[in-house]
Amino acid sequence: MRYIWMIFVGLLLAMVAILPRLGKHKPAQPATATGLADADLRAQPASLRTAATAALPPRADSIVAFGLAQRGTPYVYAGTSPLTGFDCSGFIMYTFAHFGVPVPHSTALLIDVGRPVARAEAQPGDIVVFTGTATTSTTPGHAGIVISRRGELPLRFVHASSSRREPFVKVSQVENSDYERRFMQVRRVLGPGTGIVATARPKLLSAPASTPRVAVLPPRRVAVAEVAVPVPALPQRLATKKYAASSTTVWKKAVVKKAHAKTTVAAKKNSTSTAKRKLPAKPAHTAARKRPASKVSK
């Protein structure tokens, strides 16, 4: 036991000697998206801090990965949240809004968002728009986010499907499917020339090193006086409560009583009809035929 205590004390002394040295070497502060350190940002006005920390347009791969992470979310009309479900435009709006890209929650408006690109030039992060399911439909009725690389076939996209078999967020393809008949256009919303400005949440700057720290108050014990609460004595005999008969029991008794009354009435009728019933009259006996007198031989 003595050796264990000696080892424990030695480790404590080593920690006390090493920790102050480690605190002198501060790691280099990482640069922000514009190449400025946090110390430089703190020296700038507040109006310039948000502009300096504004993120560049999000990468298409990040949008695709975030959209694929929503697979399996059920389809719900007008849904815009993975907690309640998505519709096709709600899924697109939620995915792009996560990266600060404003997209309307309407398939009819998605056909005009960004700029059009050729189907062969579609790349990850583009929006593909289709008509409705009706064969005569010519207006936008469905949309998804392209996940295929440029020039890759088939053109695959992730979307919130409203089909009866698979009503949830899933991956589909354009070629060799009904979506090829319904294909309308590919819209690009990321990059220059789209007219869409990606916004970003302002970065929270760390507090300067000169900010004084709040001293930790020592814990204080508060004495709590115990109050004796009298406990009432238990009754010698518990009161019983009569419960009313349930509706089922009342109904059963009524049915039995009614059946018994019918049986009694039927029995009375049978006895009355039997008493009044007359036995059939016996047929009148015909007059006794007189036997002819026997002839006496003379």
Image (spheres, rainbow, N blue to C red):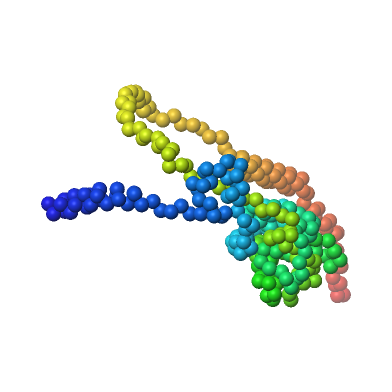
Query: Residue 224 falls in which quadrant of the image?
Result: top left
Question: Residue visible at 78% across and 66% down?
Answer: 185
- Relative to the observer, which residue lies in front, 92 or 204? 204
- Relative to the observer, which residue lies in front, 23 or 259? 23
Query: Residue 123 falls in which quadrant of the image?
Result: bottom right
The x, y position of residue 249, in whole percent, is 59, 42
Query: Residue 143 falls in which quadrant of the image?
Result: bottom right
The x, y position of residue 3, in whole percent, is 13, 54
Find the residue positioned furthest to the left: 2
Count of residue discs: 0
The x, y position of residue 25, in whole percent, is 36, 52
Left or right, 29 with reference to 108: left
- Relative to the observer, which residue lies in front, 43 or 204? 43
Question: Residue visible at 78% across and 68% down?
Answer: 183
The x, y position of residue 294, in whole percent, is 84, 70
- Relative to the observer, which residue lies in front, 97 or 292? 97
| 158 shown above or below 50 | below
Left or right, 239 with reference to 114: left
Quadrant that contains the C terminus: bottom right
Question: Residue visible at 68% across and 72% down?
Answer: 150
Question: Residue visible at 48% across and 54% down?
Answer: 30
Residue 79 visible here:
no
Residue 273 visible here:
yes
